[in-house]
Image: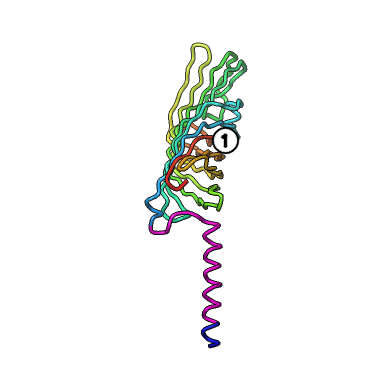
Amino acid sequence: MRTLRTAVLLGVLFASASAGAQSYYSGPPPDRAAQIFYGSVTYQLGIPIGNTYNYISDVEWRGIGVDLGWMVKPTISIGLALGWNVFYQNLTTTINYLPGVSKAGFAVYGNQDRSFNFFPILAAARWVPKLKNDVRPFLGIDIGIYITAQQLGIGLYSYSTTQVQFGLAPEVGVIIPINEGLGVQLSTRYNMAFHSGSIDFQQWLGIYAGLAWGEGL
């Protein structure tokens, strides 16, 4: 009889613990996780840092991105992060170097058009828990390439170069549901594109806002 009572008590405790765990995470069963797809389209603001800031100091408001993800486990996703980020500044000053060349070779004063166009193509891995209120915070790392086009125009002179840079970008954000299968995504990503050819190491902080969709939201 004592053994029976002990078994019943353990069963009740196990059931209670299972119910508590289910109230915290309401994601799909493990065998369905790989079938869940989600995506987002974001407007992207860029804050230049380091070499990028030295060349173009203006905060840039022109950027767009698309994230695609597949849940391989209830709280883990892999996917792609694609985007187009533009940095531009017009200024009048003296320049004594070519972009990407550290040694001064001449000095020219005049009105200048400076620009960067970054096209990130990154593989993304995220930890994406789902809380009991269906909010999905996430923490991730993106690794891949940045196709970078740099341009300088001064008077009748124009210089441009395009390079493929290896890069990575840690990110943190949250997806807040607003309807079944639809949510608002807010995130920030620290973009780092490493030196390649005539383009130095570039970096900027991206602040993103947009719409996310998917069965798991």
Q: Is residue 92 left or right of residue 85?
A: right
Residue at image point 42% right, 59% down: 30
- Amino acid found under the numbered disc labelled 1: Ile
Q: Position of residue 153 (x, y in %)?
A: 51, 17
Secondary structure, magenta segment, majority class: helix
Q: Which residue is mark 1?
A: 207
Judge by depth and name the residue closer to the eye, 71 or 110.
71
- Magenta range is 6-31
Q: Position of residue 11 (x, y in %)?
A: 52, 75
Judge by depth and name the residue closer to the eye, 137 or 143.
137
Residue at image point 45% right, 50% down: 77
Q: Position of residue 54 (x, y in %)?
A: 60, 29
Judge by depth and name the residue closer to the eye, 100 or 111.
111
Furthest toward the top, the residue is: 156
Check residue 116 for magenta coloring.
no
Q: Position of residue 176 (x, y in %)?
A: 54, 42
Q: Is residue 134 above or below residue 14?
A: above
Q: Is residue 126 above or below residue 17?
A: above
- Secondary structure, mark 1, is strand
Judge by depth and name the residue closer to the eye, 188 or 14.
14
Residue at image point 54% right, 45% down: 170
Numbered disc total: 1
Residue at image point 52% right, 56% down: 25
Q: Quadrant of residue 190?
A: top right
- Which class describes the residues within 10 Å of circle 1: few (<14), some (14-19), or many (20+)? many
Q: Quadrant of residue 102?
A: top right
Furthest toward the bottom, the residue is: 1
